[in-house]
Amino acid sequence: MKWGILELPCHFGPVQRALLVGRVVHVRFDRRHRCRPSASVTAGWIRGPNRQPTSERSRFALTEAGYHTPVEEYLEAVYALSEEGTAVIAARVAERLGRSAPSVSEMLDRLEVDGLVERSGRMISLTSTGATLAATVVRRHRLAERLLVDVIGLAWHKAHSEAGRWEHVISTEVEAKLIELLGDPATCPHGNAIPGSTPRPRREECPLIDFVGEGMVEILRISEALEPDEPTMSALEGASAIPGRVVEVKWGPSGRTLEGVSGSITVSDELAAMLFIGAEVQLNGETLLG
Ligand SMILES: [Zn+2]
């Protein structure tokens, strides 16, 4: 008998849950354990209100806006790690998503079978299909951040986690309306490029950690990896050390500080590696930005 899985018992882990809920499966009951049927996945996913399976090759549920949420999160993580120039291996994906190594490995196997990622040794990359899907999720995430900060007025440091929920429910039609409403923004409020936006010349940037002098610098971008750290993001916001603002770099007994119009923050080397400033200040040794 074919059944569509709507919910699973609590002993199923999050990845099993993500991979099974929404699928059409054959269920075979055995006499001793009526409540624990053995199930094998034999067809595609349930799609839309009619619950018609998608093609035999598609393993992941399509929501109204896009792919199944966990799939989108994995593709987004691989995209963001690649964008930052980080070597994409399973351990980095696990760190970024806060998941265990076995569950990440299992999910990457499935994504590879479905043609969304490919692996060469330990290195993971997106296929062209995976890259297109990932860019869509990242675009929706960053547009949602823009909407939340620029229109709704949510605090800058809270936008990332809130947009993490929105990115999975924005449809193609709403995405187009957001681009129109927001004026086709080039970057999210944290300075990260919005995939698919109209290409514009980009400023040269360098990580703050490479700037060893003192003087005025302009913050251009915050690493996507730092965005989930709300206390640190809040401290940066409190010091006006956010993209588009100019802050003064000073060195004191406690190390490097950034002083902005509304406060200051001590910046460790680890944090300085995730803040990007206009590169011209370092290139010409001047303290004023061009
Ligand atoms: Zn952002």
Image (tube, rainbow, N blue to C red):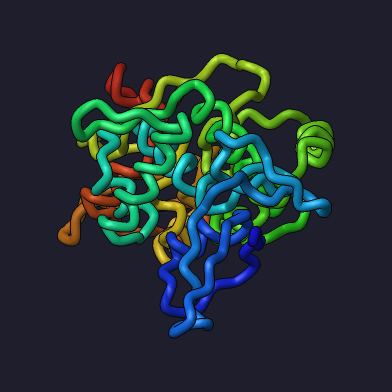
Provide residue 8's location: percent of width, then percent of height. Answer: 54, 73
Give the camera-side residue of 116 and 192. 116
On the question of residue 218 being in view, the answer is no
Give the camera-side residue of 172 and 208. 172
Provide residue 69's location: percent of width, then percent of height. Answer: 58, 52
Instruction: Find the residue positioned furthest to the left.
Output: 253
Provide residue 162's location: percent of width, then percent of height. Answer: 61, 60
In the rendered view of the protein, which quadrant contains the N terminus? bottom right
Using the rendered view, name the quadrant where residue 57 is placed.
top right
221 versus 242 height, above or below: above
Residue at 59%, 44% in the rendered image: 189
111 versus 270 height, above or below: above
On the question of residue 25 being in view, the answer is yes
Q: Is residue 169 left or right of residue 57?
A: right
Give the camera-side residue of 101 and 183. 101
Residue at 47%, 40% in the rendered image: 75
Residue at 48%, 57% in the rendered image: 40
Q: Is residue 105 left or right of residue 230?
A: left
Tag count? 0
Provide residue 217's location: percent of width, then percent of height. Answer: 40, 36
Residue at 53%, 25% in the rendered image: 129
